[in-house]
Amino acid sequence: MLAPSAKPKLLVLLGPTAVGKTKLSLEIAQQFGCEIISGDSMQVYRGMDIGTAKASEAEQKLVPHHLIDIHDPSYPFSAAEFQERVKDLIMDIHSRGKIPFIVGGTGLYIESVCYNYQFTDVSMDEAFRQEQEAFALSNGDEALHQRLREIDPGSADRLHANDRRRVIRALEIYHVSGETMSTHLASQKKESPYELCIIGLTMDRALLYKRIEERIDAMMQEGLLEEVESLLAAGCPKQAISMQALGYKEIVSYLEGDMSLEAAVTLLKRDTRRYAKRQLSWFRHMKDIHWVDVTDSANFSAHFQIINDILAGKFVHKIEYN
C-alpha cells in the first residue's frame, strides 16, 4: 500500500463532449482497480440521464461510480461543493485500496480538485445580482454575456452565455473586488496535493463535431424531449441551474413555443460544438496532461494500449497491491 507520507494518487480522464471518455474509462477502471468519480457538473442531478450522457445502469454496475444522481434538479450544485465532495471521496477510495479516477469534461470542477483551488471569498451583492438577472430577462443572456466579455474576456470564453448564474458571479466578483475572475484563477499556485496522472482525449475537430451531431440525434431518439417534459412536470423550475444545461434549455425554449423543435435541435448542435471548443481551450491551458489522439475511433485497442503505457510508466507501477 501507499507509504503514509506519500501523496494520494489521482487519475483523471478528461476531454470534450462526445470524444469517447465513457468506454475508455470503464476499461481503464476495470484494468487498474479504479472507482470512477463523475467530473461532469450536470450528472449530479437525478432524472437528467439522456441529456447528460450518463453511464448506463449496466455500465455503472461494472465499476463503482460516484457523484451521479446525488441531487434533485432544483438544487444549486457548485464547483466548491464538487471540490469538497471529491476530496473526501479520494481519501475514502484510497482507504479501500482503490484508485480514485475522475472522468469528465467540466474543466473548472476538475482543475479545482487537481490543484486545490482556493475559491474566491469575494462577498455577494444581492442587489447587484438582481440587477443583472433583470437585465438578462429583459435583454437576453447573450447581452449579459457581452457585459462580461467587455471586462473579462477570458471568463467570457470559458462560460457559455446560457450559464447565467456563473456569468453573474463573474460580473459580481469584478463589481465587488475590482479583480476579474480570470485574474483570480491565474493567481492559483497550480500545485497539486495529489500524485496526478491526467490523460486528455482529443480528435480531429470535424470528426468530433460529426460525433456531437450524431449523439444529439440519438438523444432525441432516446427521449430527450420527454425527459425535459418530465422534469418540468415534476416541478423543476425552468430557471434552475440544471435547466440551463445544454440539451435542456433548448428543449424548454421549444416547449414554451419560442422556436420549432427542428430549430431547437439545430441550436443545441451549434451550442454543443461551441462548448466542445471551449472545453478544449480550457484543457490546453492546463498542465500535466498526457494527450491521446483518438481520431481513429475504430482502433480502440491501440488507444487503450497507449493509455496503459502512460499509466504503467508514470503512475500504476508505484502502487503496490495486496
Image (tube, helix red, strand yellow):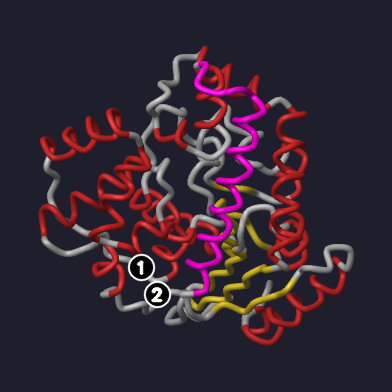
Amino acid type indicated by mark 1: Asn
Disc assigned to residue 94: none
The prevailing secondary structure element of the residues shown in magenta is helix
Q: CA distance from mark 2 to mark 1?
A: 7 Å
Tally the numbered discs.
2
The answer to which image quadrant residue 121 occupies is: bottom left
Which corner quadrant holds the N terminus? bottom right
* Circles 2 and 1 in contact, beta carbons < 8 Å: yes
Can you say whether 186 is above or below 263 in the image?
below
Residue under label 1: 116
Can you say whether 72 is above or below 98 in the image?
above
The answer to which image quadrant residue 189 occupies is: bottom left
Q: Position of residue 205 (x, y in %)?
A: 69, 64
Looking at the rendering, the stretch of residues picked out in magenta corresponds to 257-284
- Answer with left or right where residue 3 lies relative to residue 310: left
> Residue 107 magenta-drawn?
no
Instruction: Please give the name of the residue rendered at 44% of the width and 69% of the height, measured from the top-left corner.
Output: 114
Q: Nearer the viewer, mark 2 or mark 1?
A: 1
Please, what secondary structure does the residue beneath circle 1 have?
loop
Q: Nearer the viewer, residue 35 or 129?
A: 129
Which corner quadrant holds the C terminus? bottom right
Q: Earlier in the sequence, mark 2 or mark 1?
A: 1
Q: Nearer the viewer, residue 313 or 305?
A: 305
Residue under label 2: 193
The answer to which image quadrant residue 220 occupies is: top right
Q: Nearer the viewer, residue 96 or 114?
A: 114
Amino acid type indicated by mark 2: Pro
Instruction: Please give the name of the residue rendered at 10% of the width and 53% of the height, measured from the top-left corner.
Output: 176
Q: Position of residue 134 (x, y in %)?
A: 22, 30
- Answer with left or right where residue 211 lies relative to residue 279: right
Instruction: Please give the name of the residue rendered at 56% of the width and 47% of the height, measured from the top-left corner.
Output: 66
> Mark 2 packing: few (<14 Cα in 10 Å), some, or many (20+)?
some
